[in-house]
Image: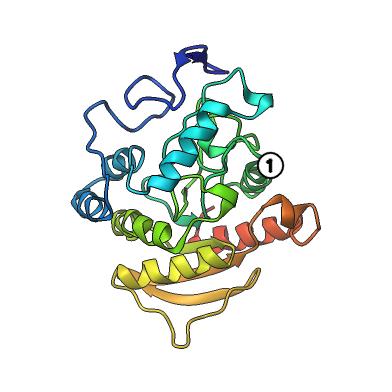
Amino acid sequence: MRLPHPRTGIEFDSPVPPGSGWPDDPAAVDTPVASTPAQVAALADKATTVAELDAAVSVCRACPRLVQWREQVAEVKRKSFAAQPYWGRPVPSWGADDPRVFIVGLAPAAHGGNRTGRVFTGDRSGDMLYAALHRTGLANSPLSVDAADGLRLIDTRIAAPVRCAPPANAPTPVERQTCVPWLDAEWRLVSEHVKVLVALGGFAWRAALLMVRAGGGSVPTPAPRFGHGVPAALQSAHGDLVLLGCYHPSQQNTFTGRLTAAMLDDVFLRAKAEAGIE
């Protein structure tokens, strides 16, 4: 059943078909679809622009379990969002095409990014993250509600190493590996601009180190260990690079006080300073 987008009022199916007018949908009806890991690698390697890569990511169907789950969630919905259409597709990265700060997370939330079509949007983790980015001058608004809310990032881009919402927030090792070429291709396209990587959690930290290595950069041996506020000096193929650790802004961390607003602000203020953003 088609339902109206909560901001634009345009009706959509759930999941949303590519090229049907969803706000900021990067894909068209004829965007090539990856259905196997080999096709993911081929399309990722072929991408020459961020827009082309985002489009291919947003229609990927290479992980059967994730496809089934994200679409099931989009059809059944959470009761509080039952009157809305759900994106129900892989969630591409978002933000500046030439970022100086590149934030790496984990995966979209089932009723957050999987619903809104924008990473870290429509859930409490996003509320915490974007409020901090706004306070530190890396976003124009503290509110992240949907893909048509006017929010913009400043010299910053956000990526999830796993692009589909996974059951129990836990992608399998095979699913994680299948998604790696998308992140590697994105790094290839934006790394010349990036001065600071921010890893939201231990998985993101490891993904960032692998990404830098795959892109021709260098990582110290032994590899730096994750910690909140901990910096690591790396080399990208284009020069000096700082990796900053940050606890993930999940409810598990924020509700228990393990991560506070002040702690987030400290990380992003340092990222902004290291990147030379005024």
For this view, does 163 lie left or right of residue 192? right
Q: Please tell me whether residue 193 is drawn above or below residue 77 in the rendered image.
A: below
Q: Quadrant of residue 187?
A: bottom left
Q: Please tell me whether residue 182 is drawn above or below residue 51 in the rendered image.
A: below
Q: Give, as a three-letter code, the residue at label 1.
A: Arg
Q: Please tell me whether residue 221 is drawn above or below residue 228 in the rendered image.
A: below
Residue at 51% x, 42% y: name it. Answer: 119
Q: Position of residue 35 (x, y in %)?
A: 27, 45
For this view, does 160 lie left or right of residue 250? left
Residue at 41% x, 41% y: name it. Answer: 67
Which element is circle 1 on? helix
For this view, does 208 lie left or right of residue 258? left
Residue that mark 1 sits on? 124
Badge 1 density bin: few <14, some 14–19, many ≥20, Cα 10 Å: some
Residue at 64% x, 30% y: name it. Answer: 78
Is residue 94 at least partly visible in the picture? no
Residue at 52% x, 11% y: name it. Answer: 9
Residue closer to the observer: 64 or 142: 64
